Amino acid sequence: MLFAAYKGDLPYYIEGAKALDSLTENSRVLIAECCTHAPLTEDIGRVKIPRILRKRVGEKLRIDMVSGTDFPDDLSDYDIIIQCGGCMFNRKYILSRIDRAKQQKVPMTNYGVTIAHFTGILDKIVY
């Protein structure tokens, strides 16, 4: 949550999290991770969030994963983008991703806001 406010646009991410409730098995999700680290056993972006999404939406949910600077120019095929905290990139770079999503009218949130939404504590966030 700290990185959502520090590196990104917390109000936009909170608004974007509402789209999580509209996902269906026919939806397409982009998980955008900035770093290119070797995934851990219980990696948040590659394991935990996809597991939560598929449990709530269905196993057929399409989830695409990008890392590093591999962020698509065309986001129109996605129903939502879930951005990592962005600790490896500067705020300007994360905001450029947010601007691209806004221009293409694709909802975007981040890892912390997604988890807060699914655990029912997002309404307790003060910004």
Image (tube, rainbow, N blue to C red):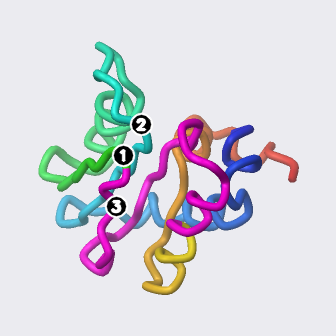
Mark 1 crowdedness (10 Å alpha carbons): few <14, some 14-19, many ≥20:
few
Which mark sits nearer the N-terminus, 1 or 2? Answer: 2
Task: Please name the residue that numbered disc 3 is placed on.
Answer: 71
Distance from Cα at disc 1 to Cα at disc 2: 5 Å
Mark 3 lies on a secondary structure that is loop
Q: How far is the residue under mark 1 from the one under mark 3?
A: 8 Å
Instruction: Depth check: give the residue in front, 20 or 68.
Output: 68
Determine whether label 2 and label 3 are within 8 Å by CB: no
- Give the amino acid at mark 2: Cys
Q: Which residues are magenta?
A: 69-97
Q: Is residue 21 above or below residue 119?
A: below
Q: Quadrant of the N terminus?
A: top right
Q: Is residue 43 above or below residue 77?
A: above
- Residue 48 lies, in percent from the top left, at 37, 29
Q: Label 2, on which residue? A: 35
Q: In the image, which disc is placed on residue 2?
A: none
Disc 1 target residue: 68
Q: Give coordinates of residue 33: x percent, y percent.
A: 40, 44
Give whichever of 90, 10 is nearer the camera: 90
Residue 100 vertical position relative to residue 94 in the rendered view, above or below: below
